[in-house]
Amino acid sequence: MPDSPILSHAFPNGLVLIAEPMESVESVAFTIRVPAGTALEPSDRGGLSAMTCELLLRGAGPRDNRAFVNDLDNLGVERGESVSDAHVVLRGATLAKNLGPALEIYADVLRRPRLPGEQLEPCRLTALQELAAVEDEPGHKVMLELRRRHFPDPWGRPSQGEQAALEAISLPEIQEFYSQLYRPNGTILGVAGKFDWPRLKEQVGELLADWPMLDEPPIDERPPTEARAHLHHESNQTQIGIAYPSVPYRDPDYYVASAAVGVLGDGMSSRLFTEVREKRGLCYSVYASHATLLDRGSVLCYAGTSADRAQETLDVTLRELARLGDGIEAAELDRLKARIKSSLIMQQESSSARSALLTRDWYYLGRVRTLDEVERIVDELSADRINRYLAAHRPDDFTIVTLGPKPLEVPVGVS
Amino acid sequence: MEFREHVLPNGLEVVAECDAQARSSALGFFVKTGARDETDEVSGVSHFLEHMVFKGTAKRTADEVNRRFDELGAHYNAFTSEEKTVYYAAVLPEYQRPALELLSDILRPALRQDDFDTEKKVIIEEIRMYADQPPYGADDHVRAVHFGRHPLGRSVLGTVDSISALRVEAMREYFERRYSPRNIALVAAGKIDFDDLVRGAEEYCGRWQPFDAPREVRPAAANSAFECLYKETSAQEYCLQIANGPSATDDDRFAAKLLATVVGDDSGSRLYWELIDTGLAEHATLGHYDYLGTGLYMTYLCCDPEFAATNLQRVSDIYRRVERDSINAAELDQAKNKINSRVVLSSERPRGRLFNLGANWTHRREYRSVRDDLDAVEAVTLEQISAVLKKYPLTRGTTVAIGPVAELPAPK
């Protein structure tokens, strides 16, 4: 099947519209990335980005809070929002015929939010409860704490913020955060599924082409402070998070590095799954994945296990990380290639998945890799090349965070 | 889109929705067995067996099973519920036959003692993982209290004790009692070569020995109770509430789903406006789930412990108001729009269709197209909603709360 052409248009105010038609679907999905994530929060206002997003969705343009939700529900728009370090991400998916009215509503959110004062306290309560809920999900919590310690601040901040900050955030602070950061330059709108491109381009132009640009705010980085941490938690299990540096998405070696991580911890024949779970029965859940910022990347590993077996789990996991540096086998790579290829094809069955990937590629690369291009890159991967890369970049320089009833020992010689 | 069906001489049913336009093929074995088919002595065996199915066969080790799935680039998994155990894989169309060969092979697991011992540790880790995540404890308990001795009151996971005590012989016996080809359907969706599917099923499953695998299906009596479980380490308070609803063979189930959407969807519903929009709860939803013989409405509330008592009262007030006045036409239309869109979106992937197809077939031996489901939802009237509310009151049920609140008053 031929690749769908990727369509894109950059408006003079910096807004990028990027779209991919999909023949086999009746739906359309959109993803809007606005450069107003947690990295842009003042350091004593953790959670401001998420609270701003929450208040943004409580009335915009001609619609109050109730009309906003009702109208989107009537349009059958399945929606969600999330906050990452760089972006606020707004997502929607619906039947193709409802795209126009849905985009109109979202343009109001971006440009004419009411930010109603009477909704501030409900937003605050929501934010505080989301923060509290993390305490009841230890596996989630350990990975948030791992990111916070591994990445240089302001990267790696959790979207849930801090209790004291959530209690203190004021309406003027939210208004200021919105008015200084929500802007067309840096915003990416991705659309995938069934749509008419000329009409879509025209509509987005009408809605957003005269949205005024703003200056990009500077970001001050501070180096990470602690590479080891144990958080006490009265629980049955101990949660283990391990991170180490890798390359970013835009690096020519990205797929090489990412394939090595796949061999390590993606799928049920991966090394971590085989050694930690299948052979020793230490864990229900264990994995490794690749995380990326614009200019650097990392590998994040997770394992959760009973407190009395946690030391063994940590030891086995670290041993596997060390062994990865010795290289991988061709058969391991072949299995991974098969998984990647079927994932690429199956992405084409989901408008939501594609619209999210369009905006991700654009942010990290400034363009979108077609499926053909990715397939070619994957085909060209060889065990030799991966092993040369691993020899030069052995997993090292670990950040290790544990959460549970008692701390673990990191073996001597592990840095 | 074409529906095809075939029955093997040993009773194994093969059904498929073939879509020549699809890019992938989804296959699954739907075994009509789950927690409701267990006894106290083997509580959790269905789910443990589901894990053991991946641990090797007469001709493959566990490693070889995992490696083969990955070689095929399969997106695969399995799950166990109260009444079914499902093994599935989504692959590119050229791998339909090898994927079927692999799934068929693992459906006759070796159940070796040493694999059993290792996997037992994994199951216990799984239970301990959930034990650290509220509302664990309340979920099994609310079912047990509500259904009493009815089979739907059983736990899917079992307990650390029941799993520790389980012997491999008991699992083998359970397998011999439940995994009859007469009790299994091979279901497929997406780009499917149906003739080849049947040929493959004959080759790989034709020798499976048939026997009867009966199941007790009776309506459940609705218990009414209110309990509060104390869990000091929990940050939030969690409340689960079960009320009886239409079963999987009851045409009222469409009205029940629409009603649950109006009252307790995660967006724009009555619970949403009262509890989520106001920030009083982190989560407040009502869902309808159908089983053979009975169905249920499940309310799930998660909130700051301080608000738990008043929130429960609010939920109860909302349900009482709905029972008294039913819902209005605008609410019904909005719910139809939402469900309409969700049905279409979830059907775009063969994997999404597979579960729908399998549920319809295992529950009712019925094929329903996407259009059939959309039409059934569209046809529901306000009168039907009122009738369902009378038959299955939302306020009559069992509530179990778990969290740092030692005692909660039952709502008035």
Image (cartoon, coloured by chain):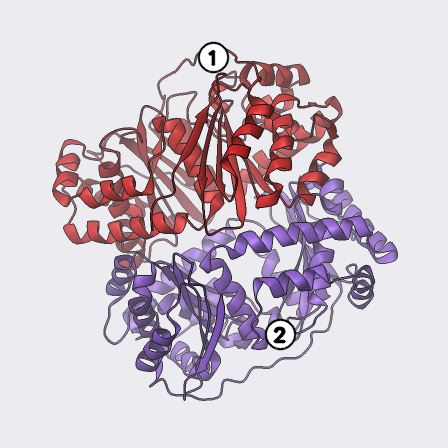
Chain colours: A red, B purple
Q: Amino acid at mark 2?
A: Leu
Q: Tell me: B262 left or right of B197.
A: right
Residue hosting label 2: B292
Disc 1 is placed on an element classified as: loop
Q: Tell me where residue B143 appears, x and y as whole percent.
A: 63, 64
* Label 1 CA crowd tier, 10 Å (few <14, some 14–19, many 20+): few
Q: Tell me where residue B70 appears, x and y as whole percent.
A: 28, 57
**Residue A388 occupies quadrant:** top left
Q: Are marks 1 and 2 on the same chain?
A: no
**Residue at 69% in and 72% down:** B250
Q: Are marks 1 and 2 in contact (CB under 8 Å)?
A: no
- Tell us which disc is closer to us: 1 or 2: 1
Q: Tell me where residue B306 appears, x and y as whole percent.
A: 71, 39
Please name whichever residue, A80 or B63, is drawn nearer the observer in this view of the structure. A80
Could one spot residue A55 in this view of the protein? yes
Q: Chain of mark 1?
A: A
**Residue at 40% in and 27% down:** A363
Residue hosting label 1: A217
Q: Chain of mark 2?
A: B
